Amino acid sequence: MCPSRWWARCLLAAGLAGLPPSLPAQVPFSPFPEAVVVNSQGERYLRALQLLGKVPAYPWTLRYFVGAELQRLAPSPQGDHPWRDRLAPIPAAASGPQIGPANWEAQILFNSAFPAGENDGALWAGRGFTVAASGGGWGRWGPLWARLGPEMFLTQNAPFPLAPNGQGGERVWQDPLGSGIDHPQRFGSGPYGRLDLGATALSLEVTGLVLGLSNEAQWWGPAQHYPLMLGNNAGGFPHAFLQTARPFDLRLARLHGRLISGRLDQSKYSPVQQGETRRFAAAAAVVVLPKGLPGLEVGVHRFSERIWPRGGIALSHILRPFATGVSVDYRTNVWEENQLAGAFFRWALPPAGFEFYGEVIREDFARDLRHYIVEPDDLMGRVFGFQRVWERTDGSVLSLRGEVVSSEVHHSERGDRFRDGRLPPRPLPRYQHGTVRQGHTQRGQILASPTAYGGSGWTLGLDVYSQKGRWSLDVSRTLRMDWLPVPLEPDQRNLADVIYTLKGEWLRFRGRSFWSVVLAPMWNLNRNLQKGDDEFNLFTGVRIGGLLWP
């Protein structure tokens, strides 16, 4: 049990840890491998530079980047851009081992009324104060690359009204949307935290391929806000991978791909409380870059998970993304796995400083061809977005971006699934079939976008990058829920639980350190489908970090 006022002590400790070291100014704050961590400020910056032609053309729909891929994303040393003096390049390969630092970071977050946060790694920011820290380093020895990036967090997890889920006891914390997956509304009644391996990975490049072990979060597809297959909302999970070191040249096109196999774990509040709780995940993604259409990326991806095999992992389990059908135990007629498959595209046009993109996913498989034709959007999610980048006369870079996502329940599922009325609506992505009940989650958090979990949303944002740092402004709308698995009063049945957010963020450099402040007022209308029960939440945060050694 944590002592009273634990959070005050954590705030003091994080504040002391966050004091920037007294080191000379005008030195790089971020080594280049750190700059391309999934969904980091450096990765988003490099993506914007690519649209200006300052970063080489390279697929951006299959991230993270490993090994020598990092060098192919480095801006030209002769090029000019706002953060030129802030990105330490990777040293040329040496005969012996090389090491470098990763940014250390400490942050303090606060939610005034309810939990809020998305695409922020293993961190879960409950109501009240949350403290988090990360750090590490990287190493290289010829074709062998290593990265150590553990992270930890601790949240006050103060109480707030829960959406009714029809459960009692410890199950009252569980997901309220009726699918019963491992997605708690709240992680228990007291402080909650954990230590995670974070962006830790080991990889080896051999004859055009890279193989390795990793816990690093992945981001598949072109989305910047609402990934449909994999994102960093839950952080990463331990897995082995095999991928192309660079796109293979096939004359008419170039081909880039990744195959992963790993372990998914559950939270304490999972619906599975007995027997095997681990799941085996196998996934594959392929990206095609057609020749004659520069900047175009077209890809497909597929994700399969099942209860951890009793007899151990076989080759057929690893190659499952390339097989057809769904594994069924015909003795019990129980589905032993769940699948999610999709397609995506991104077209980057550097001469115009513009990109547009889209992605669709579909859960499991169609009953037959007619099902595809009649109900092509059944159990489907989709996202579309754009980004326009300008280089201003004062040397700063401006980015305007927008994205919209929808995975709302198909009409055939709204209380009338398969026209028989026996099953309730099921949000997407849910992965709740047969023996696999935890859903598309890792330790209680959605592996993709929480907004896409049975809802919809949009974001419009503006970024301005300068030599001093960056400032951003985002406005967004999220449909949180429009259905609950409990009896509703007549005036609740046509309601929507909606959140509007205005988010401002300021980042500034100081020597080899940086600090940032985020302020995001949020207005939740009809919270938990209670008519007129509107909640205001103020999300604030301070982050500070940099390098501790050259």
Image: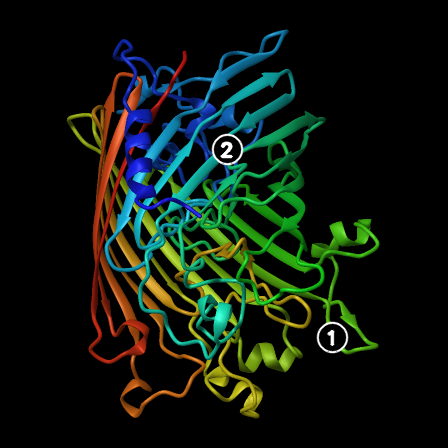
Q: Position of residue 447 (x, y in %)?
A: 51, 54
Q: In this view, does 155 lie to the left or right of 426?
A: left
Q: Is residue 334 left or right of residue 15?
A: right
State which quadrant residue 337 falls in: bottom right
Tell me the quarter of the image containing the C terminus.
top left
Q: Is residue 5 above or below residue 331?
A: above
User: Can residue 427 be seen?
Assistant: no
Q: How crowded is mark 2: few (under 14 residues within 10 Å), some or many (20 or more)?
A: some
Mark toward the start of the polypeptide (2 vs 1): 2
Q: What element carries label 1?
A: strand
Q: How crowded is mark 1: few (under 14 residues within 10 Å), some or many (20 or more)?
A: some
The amino acid pointed to by label 2 is Pro
Q: In this view, does 534 lie above or below 259?
A: below
Which label belongs to residue 334? 1
The residue wearing badge 2 is: 150
Q: In this view, does 404 lie to the left or right of 363?
A: left
Q: Position of residue 541 (x, y in %)?
A: 26, 42
Q: How many labels does the image show?
A: 2
